[in-house]
Image: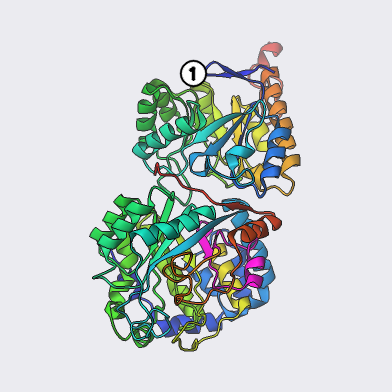
């Protein structure tokens, strides 16, 4: 198997950071004017100097997004399977050392939650869990997919990193895409935030998208947890990762998400604050650099931000999300992984999208594939 | 203007439309109606038979005099496309099919090998196949042999609005083809559509250029007129082109002096 590690090792965090800081507005202008953008252009577009060009960047991002994706926004909702977790992640509500009641959905509960989502018109779901390989491992996931497959056309999975064999099984069972976030590409900082559990193995996590690509999944979702480290440098490495993957697994689609650290029980304060204007810059940078990338915004973000980001470059949004297992009907009062910010209903998000002149898309996949 | 006949069905409009990328279904419907098209394609993956009226693409496309052409967008190989075709036939009760197999999700370029395989299989299953392909004259002849109803070579990468970048190959395809040639993908402006018709394409399929226009309805009308103008010019017989003025008999004029 090829590995991103080889590419990753040729870069140095401090050097990238220095290059970003040294970028001038003229260099940003030059990057914006180029017909084909490279990873070096992405570096310039996330630089502090680019903030002064945010409006033209947003306009370009809008044009490119409309050309490639049209005026449409794909809607989806997460379904949390379990909050059991053997990892200590100092920022996460599901962290092993967080004394919360643990819950894993059984078959009946899974279907109850699924039916609640279906009645909201959801066709695309994202299955999420903590990392508890003994109780919520590949067998649990395969069972869940077997139960859910008749009810949803598009199933994405955001769980612990798995083996190539496990990813192949998920692919064969009908999983469309796998999301796995590196959290941070800063190796030492990664270790501080993930002191215990399988997740503390940085190289294993870094090679996860390679295993997903090798298993032939349709789509891989990447992202960094914004707030752990300098978002500019982390996002450069994330883009570099996507660049490598796109060339290596050319039949696979890629999406990027922007989990910004939000309050959760037991959480530490973010080390780096990312403001709305920075998140907007980052979204534009991804779009301008990569016209085909799917860009997803979750309910972590505020109503205000989500209202305005629709025509700028995003292609998919979650809505009415519950981030606790059983959150829709089974056990609405249980503890969430993170506090959602935009709690509006699926119907109100749909009308919001329509008001922006965009079409909310509920179904864009089929059991045939 | 001569009508176009595909698999025994007569079309008075030579403009086919795609249904993706529209911001509002009402705009899509208005654009379709303004364009005068009689054939619109929609992706099987977007079809939701149970959708609410305001959400359902299929429900919005229930328009008089418009035939639906389901497409297999999303299929990465022949096997997936064949299954998608069968589901589409069941859902829409039509054996017409726009065959799209693009294993590459970035540029959505068609896989010629898998497309040929799928065409062979689907023709035997009774489908009327309209395959989206590269502007490859040899592949077009192979697809003809396999039983395709038309060929749909691309003018430029899909969604690129770059126009007829494959012009030289389109001309060869049109010259050689025994089935109608529909130029699909890349047509960015009405002038591109007119040009395709002038060189003898039988029809064009347009989506992005209309859907993403500032005024999709007006743009649909512009395409309608351009396609008609281009076709009329073709039927009227364009004068041969010359790159410069022709001097009067420079090589044979001496005969007059003899």
Quarter residue A303 falls in: bottom right
Judging depth in this view, the residue of B123 and B225 nearest the camera is: B123
Give residue B71's position: percent from left, percent from top.
49, 36
Quarter residue A11 falls in: bottom left
Point out the image quarter for the C terminus of chain B: top right
Subunit ID for the residue under disc 1: B
Give residue A308's position: percent from left, percent from top.
67, 67
Q: Which residue is disc 1 drawn over?
A: B178
Q: Is residue B16 visible?
A: yes
In the rendered view, tell whether residue B187 sits above or below residue A227.
Answer: above
Point out the image quarter for the N terminus of chain B: top right
Q: Is residue A1 visible?
A: no
Quarter residue B158 falls in: top right
Task: Locate residue A137 relative to residue A32 in the image: left or right.
Answer: left
Give residue B4's position: percent from left, percent from top.
61, 19
Identify the element where label 1 is drawn. loop
A58 drawn magenta: no
A313 drawn magenta: yes
Q: How many marks?
A: 1
Give residue A259's position: percent from left, percent from top.
49, 73
Judging depth in this view, the residue of A340 and A105 nearest the camera is: A105
Task: Locate residue B60 relative to residue A6 in the image: left or right.
Answer: right
The residue sitting at 74% across, 31% down in the picture is: B225
The residue sitting at 35% across, 53% down in the picture is: A147
Judging depth in this view, the residue of A189 and A360 nearest the camera is: A360
Decide: few, some or many residues near mark 1? Use Cα within 10 Å; few <14, some 14-19, many ≥20.
some
The residue sitting at 44% across, 57% down in the picture is: A114
The residue sitting at 39% across, 21% down in the picture is: B145
Judging depth in this view, the residue of A292 and B140 nearest the camera is: A292
Q: Which residues are magenta?
A: A290-319
């Amino acid at each position: 198997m090829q590995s991103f590690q080889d590419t990753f090792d040729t870069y140095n965090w401090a050097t990238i950071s220095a290059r970003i800081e040294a970028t001038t507005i003229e260099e940003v202008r030059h990057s914006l004017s180029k017909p084909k953008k490279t990873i070096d252009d992405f570096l310039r577009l996330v630089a502090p100097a680019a903030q002064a060009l945010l409006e033209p960047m947003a306009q370009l991002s809008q044009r490119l997004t409309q050309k490639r994706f049209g005026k449409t926004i794909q809607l989806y909702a997460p379904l949390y399977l379990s909050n059991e977790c053997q990892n200590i992640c100092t920022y996460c509500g599901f962290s092993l050392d967080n004394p919360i009641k643990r819950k894993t959905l059984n078959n009946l509960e899974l279907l109850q939650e699924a039916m609640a989502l279906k009645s909201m018109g959801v066709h695309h779901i994202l299955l999420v869990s903590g990392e508890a390989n003994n109780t919520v491992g590949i067998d649990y996931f395969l069972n869940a997919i077997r139960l859910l497959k008749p009810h949803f056309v598009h199933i994405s999975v955001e769980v612990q990193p798995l083996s190539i064999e496990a990813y192949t099984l998920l692919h064969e069972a009908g999983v469309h895409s796998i999301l796995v976030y590196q959290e941070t590409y800063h190796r030492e900082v990664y270790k501080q935030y993930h002191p215990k559990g399988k997740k503390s193995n940085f190289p294993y996590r870094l090679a996860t998208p390679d295993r997903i690509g090798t298993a032939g999944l349709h789509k891989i979702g990447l992202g960094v947890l914004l707030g752990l480290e300098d978002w500019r440098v982390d996002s450069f490495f994330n883009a570099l990762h996507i660049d490598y993957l796109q060339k290596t697994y050319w039949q696979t689609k890629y999406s990027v998400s922007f989990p910004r650290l939000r309050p959760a029980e037991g959480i530490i304060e973010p080390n780096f604050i990312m403001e709305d204007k920075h998140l907007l810059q980052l979204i534009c940078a991804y779009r301008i650099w990569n016209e085909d990338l799917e860009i997803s915004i979750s309910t972590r973000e505020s109503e205000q931000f989500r209202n305005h980001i629709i025509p700028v470059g995003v292609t998919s949004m979650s809505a009415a999300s519950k981030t606790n297992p059983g959150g829709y009907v089974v056990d609405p009062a249980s503890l969430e992984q993170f506090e959602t910010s935009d709690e509006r209903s699926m119907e109100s998000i749909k009308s919001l999208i329509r008001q922006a002149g965009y079409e909310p898309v509920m179904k864009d996949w089929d059991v045939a594939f | 203007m001569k009508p176009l006949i595909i698999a025994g069905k007569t079309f008075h409009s030579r403009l086919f439309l795609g249904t993706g990328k529209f911001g509002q279904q009402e705009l899509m419907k208005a654009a379709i109606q303004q364009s005068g098209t009689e054939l619109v394609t929609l992706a099987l993956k977007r079809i939701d038979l149970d959708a609410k009226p305001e959400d359902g693409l299929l429900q919005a496309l229930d328009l008089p005099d418009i035939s639906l052409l389901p497409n297999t967008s999303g299929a990465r190989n022949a096997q997936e496309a064949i299954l998608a075709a069968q589901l589409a036939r069941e859902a829409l009760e039509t054996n017409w099919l726009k065959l799209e197999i693009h294993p590459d999700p970035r540029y959505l370029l068609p896989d010629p090998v898998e497309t040929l395989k799928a065409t062979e299989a689907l023709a035997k299953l009774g489908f009327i196949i309209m395959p989206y392909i590269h502007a490859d004259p040899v592949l077009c002849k192979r697809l003809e042999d396999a039983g395709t109803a038309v060929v749909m070579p691309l003018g430029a990468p899909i969604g690129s609005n770059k126009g007829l970048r494959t012009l030289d190959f389109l001309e060869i395809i049109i010259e050689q083809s025994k089935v109608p040639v529909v130029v699909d993908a890349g047509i960015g402006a009405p002038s591109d559509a007119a040009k395709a018709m002038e060189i003898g394409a039988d029809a064009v399929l347009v989506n992005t250029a209309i859907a993403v226009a500032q005024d999709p309805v007006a743009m649909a009308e512009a395409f309608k007129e351009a396609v008609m103008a281009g076709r009329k010019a073709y039927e009227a017989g364009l004068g041969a082109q010359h790159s410069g003025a022709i001097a009067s008999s420079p090589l044979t004029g001496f005969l007059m002096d003899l």
